[in-house]
Image (cartoon, helix red, strand yellow):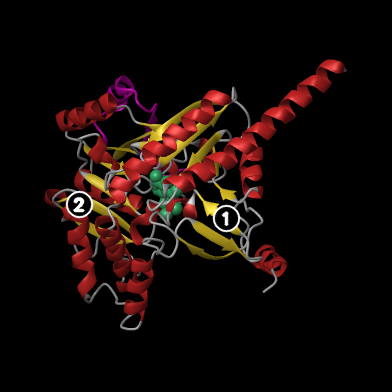
Amino acid sequence: MDYRKTIRLYYDYVVPCYHKTPLVLERGRGTRVWDAQGDEYLDFFPGWAVSGIGHCHKRVSEAIKRQVERLIHVSNNYYHELQGVLAEEIVRHAFPGKVFFCNSGAEANETAFKLVRKLGNPSRNEIITMERSFHGRTLATVAATGQQKYQDGFEPLTPGFVTIPFNDIAALERAVGARTIAVMMELIQGEGGVRVADPQFVSAVRRFCNDKKLYLVFDEVQTGMGRTGRMFCYKNYGVEPDLMTLAKSLGGGFPIGAMVAKKEIADALGPGTHATTFGGGPLACAAALATFEAIDKEKLLSNAVVAGSHLFRRLREIQKKFLFVKEVRGMGLMAGMELTIEGKNIYEQCLQKRLLINCTQGNVLRFMPPLVVREKEIDRACQLLGEVFSEEERNQTIKKGSQEAV
Ligand SMILES: Cc1ncc(COP(=O)(O)O)c(C=O)c1O
């Protein structure tokens, strides 16, 4: 189909709630995608962190193909052989616990809210979250999200969420009251601008939760599945949560979410208390099992560490050259570059050069290449970014010169 028709049909028939880039993608493989005209792009933000092990990873595609011929869906009142196997695999990499399967990050977080509220019922139901956090777009997850722009227009917000400044233990101590049941946070705030939690803060939150008998929930929807060089980001901190949520790259591109809870609390969601029709279906489980297999067999965690340090080295070299780069931060293959200028134009110029990145919070460029990325691809991406920055610098100088001449 002509790409113009693809775009027209979207505006005629699809609820227009997304900011769109005029790019129609047709196929992908690893770090690359191709558009409708056959042009190739280097993808350093694959599927908003969903295609974490690269587009159409062979193990994932093959697993889906095999499963699709056998059984596509099984209702959750029967069993199928992959669900328990996948739950065991997640738990093996995480902590002794049990898993609830769903279809997205927001749903995984909703499940965590319901579980802790069930545990605190009836008197303790308040959950503390962090400013600049992002936990999803359902009514409860926007209430949990510490950014007003996601809440505006959807009032009244779901009650029972209190937001405190990130990395501020004194604020946490002040916020906790008799009704508090849990603290929820991302270890690296992705949508919030790639802001990394301080190790001292994370340790203090854990100790504080232990003292006050609060549940600690880590939202690993974006940071999980090897993104930071460990299977889950919390392992970099040596601090274990009571609950953890996953989605995005768990299925290697296939939709799946999961909430993992410590064994001693998981059974609070007994039969009839919670459900989702599609959760933990055989196709999603096959895709997620293949994703774990790829990460393990292809040593993608160590690649995330090695390639990640190369990425940070190259980004810091760029930082030294351009005054408008304020800071480079992140971990593993999750990098943010904060600018003192708007990032939109940089994003668009990168797109022109066939490099896909992201810009969040208006001025933070975000790079999350697939875990299979190679150093020469990082070099190429950084070379293109450097070219875009040089052009930006030239334009700024010309603009300044002409303003001075007036
Ligand atoms: C940390 C975090 N939590 C939750 C979500 C929501 O996930 P989903 O869009 O799959 O509902 C996101 C999505 O960007 C996220 O980054």
Please state the horizontal and vertical placement of residue 179, each as a whole percent of the image. 26, 34
Query: What amino acid is labelled 1 in the image?
Result: Tyr
Location of the N terminus by quadrant is: bottom right
**182 displayed left or right of 31:** left
Position above or below: 19 against 27: above
Residues at marks 1 and 2, CA–CA distance in whole angstroms: 33 Å
Please name the residue shown 53% across and 44% down the image: 381
* Category of crowding for the residue at label 2, using alpha-carbon neighbours closer than 10 angstroms: few (below 14), some (14–19), many (at least 20): few
**Helix, strand or loop at disc 2?**
helix
User: Residue 203 or 63: which is nearer the viewer?
Assistant: 63
Numbered mark located on residue 93 in the image? 2
User: Residue 406 or 375: which is nearer the viewer?
Assistant: 375
* Category of crowding for the residue at label 1, using alpha-carbon neighbours closer than 10 angstroms: few (below 14), some (14–19), many (at least 20): some
Position above or below: 124 against 54: above
Numbered mark located on residue 41 in the image? 1
Please state the horizontal and vertical placement of residue 136, each as a whole percent of the image. 43, 48
Residue extending farthest to the bottom is 69
- Please identify the quarter of the rendering in which residue 194 is found: top left
Please name the residue shown 20% across and 51% down the image: 93
Please state the horizontal and vertical placement of residue 299, each as a whole percent of the image. 27, 53
Q: Which residues are magenta?
A: 155-180
- Please identify the quarter of the rendering in which residue 65 is found: bottom left
Ligand 1 is within 8 Å of the C-beta of the residue at disc 2: no
Location of the C terminus by quadrant is: top right
Please name the residue shown 34% across and 49% down the image: 109
User: Residue 293 or 288: which is nearer the viewer?
Assistant: 293
Question: Does residue 391 appear in the picture of this structure?
Answer: yes
- Please identify the quarter of the rendering in which residue 269 is found: bottom left
Position above or below: 223 against 40: above
**Helix, strand or loop at disc 1?**
strand
Position above or below: 9 against 157: below
**Given this view, does label 1 or label 2 mark the residue nearer the observer?**
1
